[in-house]
Amino acid sequence: MRTPDLHRDGWRLDDGEQRHREAPATFQIPDLAVRKLLRVGDYAKLIFEMTVEADEYPAVERMWVIIRERTPDGYVGMLDNEPNSIAENDQFWLGTELPFEYRHIISVRPGSEESVAAAKAPVPIPWDRSA
């Protein structure tokens, strides 16, 4: 499955494991075993880099994603936040479906009946699964 690309999609995911390796005392993430055990409806927090017009560097935001399905290397989720750094659009906003790997997860929390229902409902902004 194609991963998000800053140039093609206007955003990408940052590597939480790499950030942890660079600053283990100040940037902690859940153990890999925990990141591999998420279920449909659970939440994963990821770091997003987004292109912002007129800015030389991408904006960075930490946002929650609801797990929709498992993949061989991680999950497909649905964005559960509205980005602060960009204007609302129909390509990347609350409800955007996206693939991510275990290495991208910086925090987790259990789901609820509401998040499980959201995970099983049709996704508002589907991910282009073609390569």
Image: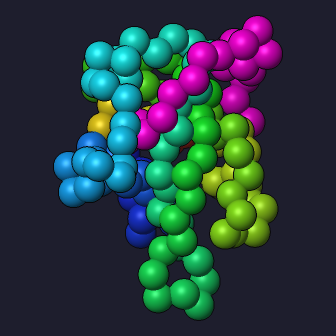
The percent coordinates of residue 108 (x first, y second) are: 51, 28
Q: How is the image coloured?
A: rainbow
Residue 82 inside the magenta-drawn segment: no
The segment highlighted magenta reads: 104-125
Image point 72% across, 13% down: which residue? 112
In terms of depth relative to the viewer, which is nearer, 97 or 42?
42
The percent coordinates of residue 128 (x first, y second) are: 50, 41
The percent coordinates of residue 68 (x first, y second) are: 57, 20
The quarter of the displayed image where residue 95 is located: top right
Residue 59 shown left or right of residue 6 in the figure? right
In terms of depth relative to the viewer, which is nearer, 51 or 2?
51
Residue 126 shown left or right of residue 57 in the figure? right
Image point 66% across, 69% down: which residue? 85
| 8, above or below 32, in the image | below
| 55, above or below 96, in the image | below
The quarter of the displayed image where residue 66 is located: top right
In terms of depth relative to the viewer, which is nearer, 92 or 31?
31
Image point 56% across, 59% down: which residue? 61
Residue 109 shown left or right of residue 123 in the figure? left
Image point 37% across, 37% down: which residue? 29
Is residue 131 visible in the rendered image? The answer is no
The quarter of the displayed image where residue 90 is located: bottom right
Where the N terminus falls, by quadrant? top left
| Residue at the front extreme, as displayed | 25
Where the C terminus falls, by quadrant? top left
Is residue 46 visible in the rendered image? The answer is yes
Residue 112 inside the magenta-drawn segment: yes
In terms of depth relative to the viewer, which is nearer, 12 or 64?
64
| Residue at the left extreme, as displayed | 21
